Amino acid sequence: MTEISGKIYVAGHRGMVGSAVCRRLASEKNCEVLTATRDQLDLTNQRAVEDFFARERPDAVIFAAARVGGVLANDTYPVEFLGDNVLMSTFAINAAYTAGVKRFLFLGSTCIYPRDCPQPIQEDALLTGPLEKTNEAYALAKIAGLKLCQFYRRQHGVMFHSAMPTNLYGPGDNYHPQHSHVLPALLRRFHEATQQEIDSVTIWGTGTPRREFLYVDDLADALVFMLTQSNPPDWVNVGTGVDLSILDLAHLVAKTVGYQGEIKTDPSKPDGTPVKCSDVSRLNSLGWKHQVELAEGLERTYDHFLSELESGLMRSV
Ligand SMILES: NC(=O)C1=CN([C@@H]2O[C@H](COP(=O)(O)OP(=O)(O)OC[C@H]3O[C@@H](n4cnc5c(N)ncnc54)[C@H](OP(=O)(O)O)[C@@H]3O)[C@@H](O)[C@H]2O)C=CC1
Ligand SMILES: C[C@H]1O[C@H](OP(=O)(O)OP(=O)(O)OC[C@H]2O[C@@H](n3cnc4c(=O)[nH]c(N)nc43)[C@H](O)[C@@H]2O)[C@@H](O)[C@@H](O)C1=O
C-alpha cells in the first residue's frame, strides 16, 4: 500500500464519476486535484492533450472522461462511441507516458466482457467470446484503452492499470429520457408519472435482463483504494456482485418515488446484454468492498435528483 499524494488529474471531473472522485479526494490531505473543463481541454484534440500533460505533469491520472450513454445511445451512435473514446484514451495515455506520469488509472466497463460469458463475470473472461452488439463500439474502445495501459506497464514499467465498473448511479447522473442509463431514466419517468398522476409507466425491453448497480461514491472510493495498491491487477471488476431483473429494478424505483400505478414493458426497445453481474472477489480479496446497498443508494439518489431538479442543475444531455 502507498499513500495518496501529489498532483492528481481527474479527467471528466464534471461527470457523474469524475465529480464523485473529486468529492472523495477532497478528504486526502496530501493531494492536489487537477481538473480541466472540456472548453479548456478537448480530449479528442491530440495536440491540446499533449500540451496539457507536458505543462501540468501530474503525478497520477484518474481517467473518468468518455462519451457515455445507455443501451439506445450506444446502439444509435456507434461511430462516436468507438471513435471519440478511442481517441480520448489513446491521446491521454500516450501523452501521460511522454510527460513522465507514473500512475494512470483508466476506467472501462463490464460491457468489455463477452455477451454470453459465465456469470458472475471474472476478469479472465476478457476476449473469450463475441461482444453484445448494442454496445460493441464502446466495448471495443474500452478494451483498446485497458490493453494500451497493460502494454505500457509491460513494455515500459509504468503503473498504468484499469478498473471495470458495473452499471453506476448516483448524484450528477444524466437524466436524458433517451440517452441515459436505465436507473436515472426510470427515476425520472416514475417521478414524472407520480407528479402527473399517470396510471401506467412503460419500461424498455422485456424487463427480464439482469443488471448489477454500484453507487458512484463507492466506485470513487474503490478507485482511490486502487491507487494505493503497489501492485494492482492490470484490470479489476468493481461492483457489488448482486444483480436483479430490470422489472424488479422498476418496482424498486416505483417504491422509492412513491408511484403506485401499473408497470408495462415495451419489447420493441432493445434489451441489450441478457445478464451482467461481475465477480468482485479479486477486489474484495485486496481489501475493498462496497458500502451502499441498492435500496439505500436509490433513496440518496432520489434526494439528489429532487435537489438537482429544484436548483435547475439537473443534467439531461
Ligand atoms: N455511468 C455508468 O453507468 C458507467 C460508467 N463507466 C465509465 O466511467 C467513466 C465516467 O462515466 P460517467 O461519469 O458516467 O459519464 P459522464 O457522462 O457523467 O461524464 C463523462 C465526462 O467526460 C467528459 N468528456 C466527454 N468527452 C470529452 C471530451 N471530448 N473532452 C473533454 N471531456 C470530455 C464530459 O465532459 P462534459 O462535462 O463537458 O460533458 C464529462 O465530464 C467513463 O469512462 C465510463 O465509461 C463505466 C461503467 C458504467
Ligand atoms: C453501463 C453500461 O450501460 C449500457 O448497457 P446497458 O446495461 O444495457 O444499459 P442501460 O442502462 O441503458 O439498460 C439496461 C437495461 O435496462 C432496460 N431499460 C428499461 N427501461 C429503460 C430506459 O428507460 N432507459 C434505458 N436506458 N434502459 C432501459 C434496457 O432495455 C436494458 O435491458 C451500455 O452503455 C454499456 O456499454 C455499459 O457499459
Image (tube, helix red, strand yellow):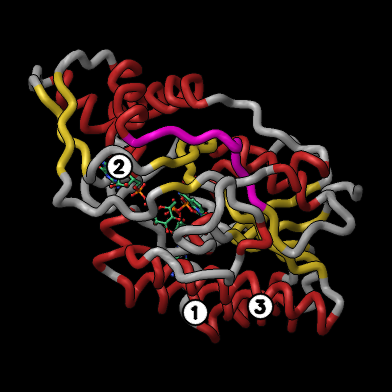
Q: Which one is closest to the eye, mark 2 or mark 3?
A: 3
Amino acid type for the residue under numbered disc 1: Leu
**Label 3 SS:** helix
Image coords of residue 86 (percent x, y): 49, 77
Residue receiving disc 2: 175
> Does the residue tagged 3 have its C-beta within 8 Å of any atom of ligand 1?
no
Q: Relative to residue 297, is residue 178 drawn left or right?
A: left
Q: Which residues are magenta?
A: 237-246
For the residue pair 303 and 30, the one nearer the viewer reads as: 303
N-terminal-most mark, 2 or 1: 1
For the residue pair 299 and 150, the one nearer the viewer reads as: 150
Image coords of residue 242 (percent x, y): 55, 34
Q: Which one is closest to the eye, mark 1 or mark 3?
A: 3
Residue receiving disc 1: 87
The reply to whether discs 2 and 3 touch (Cβ–Cβ < 8 Å) is no
- State which quadrant residue 196 falls in: top left
Query: Which label is found at residue 148?
Result: 3
The reply to whether discs 2 and 1 touch (Cβ–Cβ < 8 Å) is no
For the residue pair 276 and 199, the one nearer the viewer reads as: 276
Image coords of residue 217 (percent x, y): 59, 36
Amino acid type for the residue under numbered disc 3: Leu
